[in-house]
Image (spheres, rainbow, N blue to C red):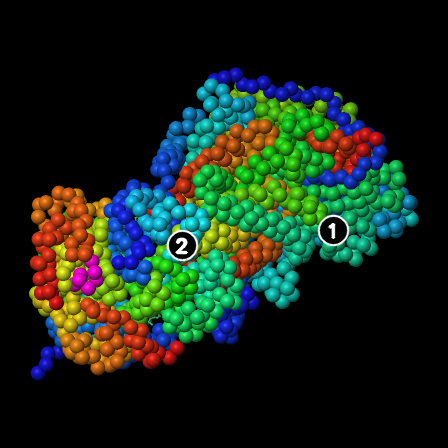
Amino acid sequence: MTAVAVRPAGHRSGRATGVARFVARRLVMLVATLFTSSFVIFGALYLAPGDAVSTLSGSRTLSPQAVAALREQYHLDDPFLARYFQWLGDTLLHGDLGTSITYREDVSSVIAARMGVTFQLVLYAALIIVVVGVGLGLLSGLRGGVVDTSILVVTTVFAAVPSFVAATVLLSAFAVGLGWFPAVGTGEGLAGTLWHLTLPAVALALASLAIVSRITRVAVRTELGREHVQTAISRGIPYPALVRRHVLRNASIPVTTVVGITIASLFGMSAVVEQTFGLGGLGSALVEASLARDVAVVQGVALVFVTAFVVVNTLVDVAYAVLDPRVKAGSRAS
Amino acid sequence: MTEEPVLRVTGLRREFGGVVAVDGVDFEIPRGGSLAIVGESGSGKSTVANMVVGLCAPTAGTITACGRDRSRPARSAKERRLRGREVQIVFQDPYASLDPRHCAEQTLDEVLRLHRADDGKQQRQARVAELGDLVGLDARQMRARPRALSGGQRQRIAIARALAAEPEVIILDESVAALDVLVQAQVLNLLADIRERTGVSYLLISHDLGVVRQITDETVVMRRGRIIERGPTADVLAHPRQPYTQVLRDSVPHAGWKPTRALRALTEGAQPS
Amino acid sequence: MTVPVLEVDRLVVDVLVEGEPRTVLHEVSLSLGEGEALGLVGESGSGKSMTARAVARLLPPGARTSGTIRYGGHDVRTLKGGALRDYRGDVALVFQDPRAHVNPVRRIGDFMTEALRTLHGVDKHTAAKRAAAALADVGIADGERRLEQYPHELSGGLLQRVVIATMLLTEPKLLLADEPTTALDVTTQAEVMAILDELRQERGMALLFITHDLDLAGAVCDRTAVMYAGQIVETRESAKLHEDPLHPYTAALVTARPAVDRAVDRLAAIPGRSVSAFEAPDGCPFAPRCPHAVDACHQERPPAEYVDGGLVRCIRADELRGRLAEEVAFHD
Amino acid sequence: GSPPPTKGQHQTATLSATTAVPVGDTGPLTWGLYRATSSLDPLTAIDIPESSVIDSLCESLLLQKPDFALAPGLAESAEYTDPRTLVLKLRPDVRFWDGTLLTPADVVFSLQRARDPKAGGYYSTVFERVASIKATGPHEVELKLSEPDYWLRGELSTMAGTIVQKNDTERKGKKFGTPSGGVMCTGPFRLKSWKAGGETVIERNSTYWNPDQRAKTPRITFKPVESSSAQTAALRTGDLDGYYSPTLSSYEQLKKNARLTVATGPALATDALAITNLQGPLGDVRVRRALSLAIDRSAYSQAVYHDQVATPRTSTNPGTWAYGTSVFAETSGKASPLDRDLDQAKKLVRQAGAEGRTLVMAVVPALSSINTLSTVVSEAARALGLKIEFKTFSPDVFGTLFVDPKAREGIDLLPTLNGPYHGDPAPYLATYTLPGGGQNFSGWQDAKVTRLLTAARETAGDDNRAKLVAEADQLITKELPWIPIAHPYSVVYMSKKITGAPASSVFGNGPWANMIGAARK
Amino acid sequence: MTIAASVLDGVRTRRRRVAGNTVVVWVCAAIVGLALLLAVFGPALAPHDPDAADLTYANVGPVAGHPLGFDSQGRDLLSRLLAGARTSMAGPALVVVLAMAGGTVLAVVSAWAGRWIDATLSAVMDVLFAFPAVLLAVLAAAVFGPGLTAPTLVLALAYTPYVARVLRGAALRERAQPYIAACEVQGLSAFTICLRHLVPNIAPMMAAQGTLLFGYAMVDFAAISFMGLGVQPPTSDWGVMVSTGQPGVLQGYPAESLTAGLCIVVVVVAVNLLGERLSQRSEGR
Ligand SMILES: Nc1ncnc2c1ncn2[C@@H]1O[C@H](COP(=O)(O)OP(=O)(O)OP(=O)(O)O)[C@@H](O)[C@H]1O
Ligand SMILES: Nc1ncnc2c1ncn2[C@@H]1O[C@H](COP(=O)(O)OP(=O)(O)OP(=O)(O)O)[C@@H](O)[C@H]1O
Ligand SMILES: [Mg+2]
Ligand SMILES: [Mg+2]
């Protein structure tokens, strides 16, 4: 809708079909990606050594009868394609994502139970990235001098700190050392959730935040150096208005791309942080489930991740078209 | 009996997704001749040039170079090579049209290796030096990267490269437009010399009527993809028949010239918008 | 000559080139009276744009200046705060590439009315009206519609007219036009030049017109200054430049241009290329290319001297005066 | 080099299976699990995250006390009326959470379900000598045996003897024991909520049939905390009130923490190297003995368990000696410790002519205890002039080694932490020493061991049976089909504000959560 | 996992900065050079056998001959760090080589062929993009088992679309240059033009991307190892050491985790700064 609104009058119907085609293309891509990923997942877990029974037994010996019963119950001995198409059929026809072997539960309820944490975590981290990252970037881009240098130094280091290192350090410093934040788990209510998720979100956001800040800084600098900004200066436009009207809006175009991709990739990165902070989210579910050869859960989580990625990217493209009148929806300059 | 022209173009047409960039263009260049295409920006001049050298395919029409049909871009490497010996091009931007990583010698040697496969290394070196002499570059300049050379020197390399394949026709697409007047004069003189010495033909594309007058015999005027006027350059410029050509001619600043808006309005009238 | 609006005296500008300070303008002096048009002509890198930038206080970071730039009795180089803003309100700039100089993500209307609204407190409606009227002045009839468009939806010529109209909205006293027509077709160039010329005369604006085309400068400017390697080598009434150039460089510029009405056997080309001030050798920077150079030319920089109402930097100016005129005449 | 650092002292003091008795009720608690609970069906519970939750919800026919001694549970008594008949007398007053009374039908149903291999339970082999299960009275159930089986009674205290409600279980079908189905039991807590892969919350069963054992906390939230550093952190910050730790990596740290009580207690499991291939060098008992003699158990125990282990003397953890205790103490308990004796070990290898031969050990680099074990084994092998090769597995694939014989091919040594489910070493020993035993990976057998253990199974008196088992235990320790490495203690970490959680590892098979209460008024 | 994406994307928006002090560049170059030397000679330089464990020395601090002390298995920490340089650098280096090779080929083919080939390749890249890297890592680890293979393949696969996207832009810009057209007019074959003209001219961009990528590959590699999906202990590898040493951080023996983490951070910072400079240079050409 918004992409349509920025268009000058007169082209409305053409733009509308353009947007429709854009959305359609994205949907096709989403479906293609999901198909590919589902097949790859099935194939990979089929080829992989080890099977679900060993997870069920928890490294204890089971009687052969028990093993056989389990194998039969979960169709573990069926041929690959048969299992794949059965799963695909169930998913497409009944819209159910299958049953988790490890949790003996519908995958949809496994995902539902875990989705909240991951989305909250990603949302929180995204917020930190946008507010702090962009904020620092603006500060160092517009200020220069000592402020710039110190932000540059800090972000250079942050950008190189792996999230698991950040998680360990934050955990031992702020949870264990100072006791300001809880070490594990998710809280109740908004305040509790915020309080519990602060450290994980910071750990997740840290490197991305640094990168976003650096990109923002460069974008701001680039825009400040552009000729149209020079023109505006020569016209006597006061600095604050200049920054607001000519620098921020224009700089937000590259920043949006980076922020979008960063946020989209947070879903994948959440696994490490979830593990460290004992948050039972989708990321850790993905890792656990694939270790356990719990194909249905892996498929389900992958579906959520892929969809989230495509949706965030689509939003970025729409934002792009809104911010930059030269760009038609969906034709991001690359 | 007239000699076969080195380049003949008939009914050339090119569309870009519904936009007709070139529409029914015909012209020919006799051996050793020099033809100018003039016209406003976007009138399709470069598109014609690109079709003639095989960088883009015509929607319709034929191109005949040296008696051979060249209406389609080359498909095989061999055909490309053969075409390279018929028509060459020199572009407007002398910096961008040279590989920044190769010096003039390398650039020329590469072309020679392609077109004179039988030559030995020494023969090629001799030919490179000869080409360098022809365009007036000394040995140091021949070994310098384009970055270290001035615009005029770069354009000389581009001209030498075009000459290396010993083509029959060289297309000069705004080849002197980016040069300062003094350098432009040097290059124009050079082009005239080369034509005299080698008998090569030129297809000059330019906005600059002074340049056109200086080095071409014939002129075609293009507007919105069509040729609207043609004739000997001196005639066309001295006695333009079409109103547009007149406007073009009168827009050229010269001593005692006063710009007027009325001029433009004349051409504007024909525009739909 | 009337009261000078702008007076530049022995302006020297050093800018950072690859981190090193390099002189790009050397003792540039010029003055511009009310309603007067001065052409600034020269080859690429000669320092024309730098001069305009210095006047507009838009030098790149790290630049150092000396000499004076006077506007309304103040040295522009030291203006601050409100005074600087006032000055900028009085001076308008038009550049070669309009597309780079207009914010691509804002509407034409936004661009045009921005200064009116932020600096002059004009309300939105009035500002838009005035913008549309200004567009009509430069020959754009459907102004209202144009205001709603984005820069990329306009052609270069149209956009340049928009820029000119915009600059005029705030009624500047001095217009700095840096090759405003180089990117345009000749026919469009003629029109834009006509607009500039008309507006200047109607409003009594002073115009500093930068171009590399001597003929173009001559057509709209009362006087023309010729620059070479960061120096003004000659300032003269435009009309006289063509018949009676004082500097060999000016003569070379005149004769090197191919004429529309006549082809010559060979153009009068001189060897070499133009250089920036910091690349120039000691002595007269033009000496290495000058067909008339003598040993003395390589020794020291020629001072600026008054000759026949013009200024010239050539130690042989008097001596050569007749010969240059002949060269030029032969060319014509 | 430099002098080696001083090692911790081996503990010799006797262990208490319990912690201080609480003075009263406490508030809601958060208890740690090393991973999320995956099932609440007793029959598929085999690991702490399942069994410790189930044990708070459901009860078995007999009850394990913290010291693993058997006590009446849902059955007032379980007695052999003759060697082939085990009669269960049920309590008349037991109610499920929904208020219905426990009936023999429920018991028969639960036991039959556990016995049926097709039901997918893990404990069906326990009932291999059971011929029939029948209700023989309003409060009586009778198990008829095909052969005498005096090990069966103890099994009734494990998941195999845990009773679920017949109606409920049948109604739920496949959903039984899953987050959407839940369970219906009789225990002191009832299931409040359970998110798949997330927290499990249990609350006090206010209508619990046994007021003496009622829960002293209104609610326990079981929180899965996967990484050991997060576990440590959570205990230190108070995010967890308590935790039974499967690893002791932070033991020293937490022991010093003023907010925590750290108690060690008896356990059932033994850290051992299972010999999986008798075709290789380890087919020779001298090489097995040599390896056992060369392994630096104390270094291992120190590194992995901070010395919280019973020094191995035989193959069985002293924690398992819950009956015939004095018999075991006199025999297995008096055996000489499995100390290091490199000279003797080298001699054995020489005798066996095994120098230069290669041993292949399965290792899981991601598990630090197995890692450390590989370190001591490789040191031992080096000292003996044996070559050692490690075959690395990820933790997940490692599990298949216990399920799939093909996966074990080419491997000589398989590290395992293994033990019985109740206080009887015999069934555990039988799994790897009897022909056809579930864990007899190498097919090892010894006529005398077989005879002793079979006899023990058919011997009624606890002490007599203990004698036979202890003899077998010592024999096995000589023959070493598996090489015992350590008998780790159970460790519980508790916030100082609470107490009562058993220090022993009874949480795997007996009630424990209801014992926790406030430490102070 | 896909931080690299954002960086790569952002790099294009970067412009020449005022030439910073060259000291930083030299220091970074020295660090990277040292790291590379260690990757080659590290295992040879190690004063002790990095895998020789002696539990009696577990977590013992620095003593004579062991300046950094011992890890939780009683192995010499310095030796492990030195030996670890190789795996820590070799994996990411391989990833960079593979991803750059694949990405460059895809980019050049896309840019040159245009039309449907470009469209198809772009669509395939988009599909790859949408795949969470963690998922790939987990699957590859499952299939290939522990070791270098899985993470190398995964990261190469995950980075290829980013490289392809960035380089495709550069290749398109380069392809639009008249000098390429001039080569075509000369009659050079497409392959020759790409090999001799196009690729060398996007090489500075490739070098910059490769360098930046190396930094991110190191971090991502370490992350995969941290999750237990990559290189496995007892192999000394910095990422693995951070992970195996992690419990020690809370137990008061932070040396293993922190020194290894510091090695990663220092090398990555140096590599990133170098990469940034390179990309500024390649942009400001
Ligand atoms: N690749 C292309 N795709 C779409 N349209 C094109 C393409 N190339 C040229 N055009 C269009 O074709 C028309 C003619 O362009 P062309 O470049 O031939 O003009 P020209 O006469 O050379 O102009 P100029 O003097 O500005 O170089 C223009 O309207 C242009 O927009
Ligand atoms: N931002 C800058 N930083 C450093 N040097 C510059 C900068 N802009 C221009 N120069 C240098 O200053 C000298 C004068 O440049 P200027 O732009 O004034 O030339 P010009 O006469 O306007 O040329 P053109 O006709 O090409 O526009 C040149 O040598 C140029 O390289
Ligand atoms: Mg053109
Ligand atoms: Mg300029």
The residue to which callout 2 is attached is C88
Confirm whether residue D25 shows in the render: yes
Q: Position of residue D168 (x, y in %)?
A: 81, 54
Residue E216 located within the stretch drawn in magenta: no
SS of the residue under disc 2:
helix
Residue C237 located within the stretch drawn in magenta: yes
CA separation in Å, label 1 and label 2: 79 Å
Residue D407: which quarter of the image? top right
Q: Chain of mark 1?
A: D
Q: Position of residue B39 (x, y in %)?
A: 26, 73
Q: Are marks 1 and 2 in contact (CB under 8 Å)?
A: no
- Say what amino acid the circle numbered 2 marks: Arg
In the picture, the disc for residue A25 is none
How busy is the neighbourhood of tag 1: few (under 14 within 10 Å), some, or many (20 plus)?
A: many
> D413 or D517, which lies in front?
D517
Q: Chain of mark 2?
A: C
> D209 or E86, which lies in front?
E86
Q: Position of residue D171 (x, y in %)?
A: 79, 57
| Residue at x-position 72% and y-position 52% | D178
The residue to which callout 1 is attached is D177
Q: Is residue D47 left or right of residue D113?
A: left
Q: Which residues are magenta?
A: C236-242
